[in-house]
Image (cartoon, rainbow, N blue to C red):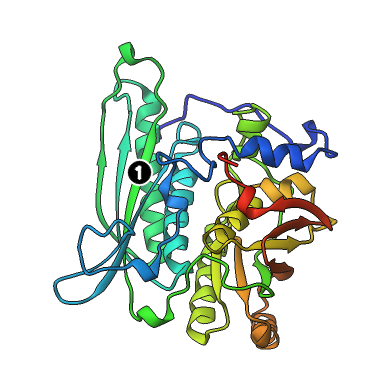
Amino acid sequence: MIEQSNEIQEFSISQLNEEQDIQDIVFNLMVDPNLAPINYFNDFTEEAIDVSAVSSDEDDETGMFCSESGQMMAISTHALHHHLEVDPQQATEILVSRAVRKMICFGAVPEAISSFLYHINVADPNGQFIAAGAKKGLENACKKFNIKLADRKIRFDYFSAHGPVPPTTIVSIMASIPEKDKLVTHSFKKKGNNLFMIGNSYDDINSSEYLEFYHGISDSSLPVFDIDTEVKLHDVMRMLIEAGYITSANPVSKGGLFFTLLRAGMPNGLGFDITTDAEIRRDAFLFGEAMGRIVVGVDPKNVDDFVDFMSSLKVPFFALGHVTKGEIRIDDESFGFIDKMTPAN
C-alpha cells in the first residue's frame, strides 16, 4: 500500500470571527485574479456557454460546435491543484464532478473525459501516492457519472531546480447536445424571476477563494463533497430541464454563491435580491464553495409546478430570492448595482 507523506494543517471555520463586513469582503474579492469579472487570463471554466453565439465552425470559442455529422457538441476544460498531495482521489472526484455538473446544467449529455496529471516527482514516494489516488478517483467518478474515460496521462516533469510546483490535474470533458431548443443558459433572463437553491448550505469555507485570498489561509481541507449526492443532483437537473421548469441554472462554484449570482447577472445587467440562511454563517453562505449546490431561475408562472415537482422528489431546496432590474441586495442591504461590479468602475 502506498502511504501519503504529506499532511495538511487542520482548519476550523470557528477560527474566524463570524461578524464580518460582507461589503468589504465583496469588494476585496473583486480584485482576486481568479474572480475578477474582467480578466482575460481567468479560469474560463466558470464562463458559461453563449448558445446564441453558436456557429458551425469547429473553432468556435464558445466551446460548442457541430460535428461533420451535424451533431452539436460541447467541450470544456477544468483544472485543480488543491490537496492532490493529501487526498488525490477525492480531489480528482471533485474536479470531474465540477466538469460534469457544468454540462448537465445547460442540458448537455457528458460523453467522455480525458485527464492529465502534471508536476509529479517519480522519485518521491508521495508522487506515487498522488498518481495512484488520482487514477482511482478518475475511474470512480467516470463510473458514477456513466461517462467514458477516453485518455489519461501522467507527466513526470518535476525538477528540483524549478522549486516547489504543486501537482495539478487537468480534465477536458466532451458532451453531446440532444436538443438545442432545450438548452438552459447561465444568465438571468428577466426581472422578477424567482431564484431557488437546490441542495444544502453548509458552514464550510474550506479551500475557497474567500479563505485563501481574503484571509490568506491556504491550508484547509477540501470543501464539503459527496459524489452520490452529485449523481442525484444531476438526475434532478435533467428532469427539470426536460420539463421546462427553469430559465437558468448555475452550479455554485468559484467564489461561492455571491460570485455565482454575479456571473449570472452580468450578461443582461440584472441584479439579485436574496436572503441568507439564519442557521448558516453569512460568510459561508455567500462565499463558501461546498459542492452539491445549483442555483436555478424560475419564471413566476412556473413556481407552483416547480415547487410541487421538487417536493415530490424529496430533494433539499429552498427559495433564495429573485432577480432585480440591476440592484444587488442581501438581507435588505444594498450592495449597489451590477453594472458597477467591475474593476474598471
Q: x, y percentage for residue 35?
A: 54, 42
Under mark 1, the amino acid is Ile
Q: Looking at this view, is 131 or 13 the one in front?
A: 13
Q: x, y percentage for residue 190?
A: 61, 73
The residue lying at 23 percent from left, 75 percent from top is 71
In the image: residue 200, left or right of residue 31: right
The residue lying at 55 percent from left, 55 percent from top is 263
Q: Is residue 139 visible?
A: yes
Categorize mark 1 by other alpha carbons within 10 Å: few (<14), some (14-19), many (20+).
Answer: some
In the image: residue 242, left or right of residue 54: right
Q: Looking at this view, is 136 or 255 the one in front?
A: 255
Determine which residue is flagged by label 1.
Answer: 170
Q: x, y percentage for residue 264?
A: 56, 60
Q: Looking at this view, is 130 or 282 the one in front?
A: 282
In the displayed structure, 97 sits above or below 315; it is: above
Examine the image and state in which quarter residue 312 appears.
bottom right
Quadrant of the drawing holding the N terminus: top left
The residue lying at 38 percent from left, 62 percent from top is 143
Examine the image and state in which quarter residue 206 appears.
top right
